[in-house]
Amino acid sequence: MRRTMVLVGVLAVAVLAATLSMAQTRTPTALDIYVIDVEGGNATLIVAPSRESMLIDTGNAGVAAARDAGRIIEAIHDAGLQQIDHLITTHWHGDHFGGMAELAAKVPIREFIDHGPNVQPGELADTFLLRTYPQLYAKAKHTVVKAGDKISMSGLDVRVVTSAGETIKTPLSGAGTPNPYCSDFKASDNNAEDPQSVGTYIAFGRFRAVHLGDLTKNKEFELMCPNNRLGAVDVLLGLHHGVSSSNSEVMVHALHPRVAIMNNGTRKGGEPDVMKTVHSSPGLEDLWQLHFSLLSGQEYTVPGMFIANTIDDQQQTMPIAPMAAPQPGPGVPPAPVHNGKAYWIKLSAQQDGSFMITNTRNGFTKSYGAGL
Ligand SMILES: [Zn+2]
Ligand SMILES: [Zn+2]
């Protein structure tokens, strides 16, 4: 009798131990980043190991809003999330806040973060900020961030490095050495809202990533010169779709990213100047893209296995020469459309700084060891 009891006890302990170890293997230890295809807009989902989440931007407005919100929801489900804890809207352009109302109707959003009111008047943003946005954050938290603010996320160190046209003045810890690229800088700007972008720096153990929204070259200079206030990063996210009003060497080369992930469209970004800057960035191992871009042509594009999406009507060939960006206006042929199934690029980072990237279209995965 006693022996049986002991045996039952031993078995119970063994079962308990096995259950615990299974639970442990199920507990996520990685920081996951989903770079979601919203056709030359932005939607980047950051998921801490605790599953606390931060979404940066909500894709395009108008007829594209439901499509883009749907693509974001797919990623939210893939990550096993029930809500978005922090939503950053980098700035008030329709390719960044466009799907917000559609998304908020389907997924609870706990905190809405932005740089303050729009500084570039426009029907879309004016109306959204007056009528829609206050209703969305009425039952949540609304935070206007300044450069230097922290966003509290368990297990991560998340810092706002630019907002409302201001940049951090004090270097991040370990950064602040003179930036050798500053002497060759050529000033460039485009519109009033892009320079207002909320830029976010994310540290997880030894892993570092930065997303600067659509921050323009002049602000890159203010942030990175004369001293590099951000230091080096493992991954540069976004790159303003690969548009040439951003992505100076002052920023790209000085950040010394091992990997860049570009949120370009089929005919937006990926311009030759940007591709040259990124491809020649010291220490860069790979550039990943949400799309090929007609503006790159075969001449500047990365191999297809690093490109997450194709188009609805597949082209037979891609010209070698990059296409010149058409001037906006009537008579311009539309960019190749992609309203069908879309694929995200997923990055999973570990505390030691190592990370893995997967192209979910073709299953191609590449591991990057811990940095120095
Ligand atoms: Zn697409
Ligand atoms: Zn944009």
Image (spheres, helix red, strand yellow):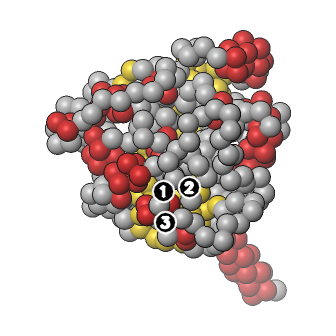
Within 8 Å: ligand 1 and the Cβ of disc 1?
no
Kindly report the distance in space between the C-alpha atoms of the residues bearing marks 3 and 2.
10 Å
Give SS at disc 2.
Answer: loop
Q: Residue at x 66, y 71 (%)?
A: 316
| Residue 336 location (% of width, % of height) | 68, 53
For the question of whether residue 125 can be seen, the reply is yes
Q: Are marks 2 and 1 in contact (CB under 8 Å)?
A: yes
Quadrant assignment for the C terminus: bottom left
Where is mark 3, residue-wise? Answer: 320
Q: Residue at x 67, y 20 (%)?
A: 125
For the question of whether residue 104 can be seen, the reply is no
As drawn, the label of residue 294 is 2
Where is mark 1, residue-wise? Answer: 322
Residue 17 appears in which quarter of the rendering?
bottom right
* Amino acid residing under circle 1: Pro
Label 3 packing within 10 angstroms: few (<14), some (14-19), many (20+): few
Q: Nearer the viewer, residue 367 or 38?
A: 38
* Amino acid residing under circle 3: Ile
* Amino acid residing under circle 2: Leu
| Residue 92 location (% of width, % of height) | 60, 24
Left or right for 120, reference 244: right
Give SS at disc 1.
Answer: loop
Left or right for 244, reference 39: left
Q: Is residue 217 above or below residue 203?
A: above
Kindly report the distance in space between the C-alpha atoms of the residues bearing marks 2 and 1.
6 Å
Q: Which comes sooner in the sequence, label 3 or label 2? A: 2
Q: Are marks 1 and 3 in contact (CB under 8 Å)?
A: no
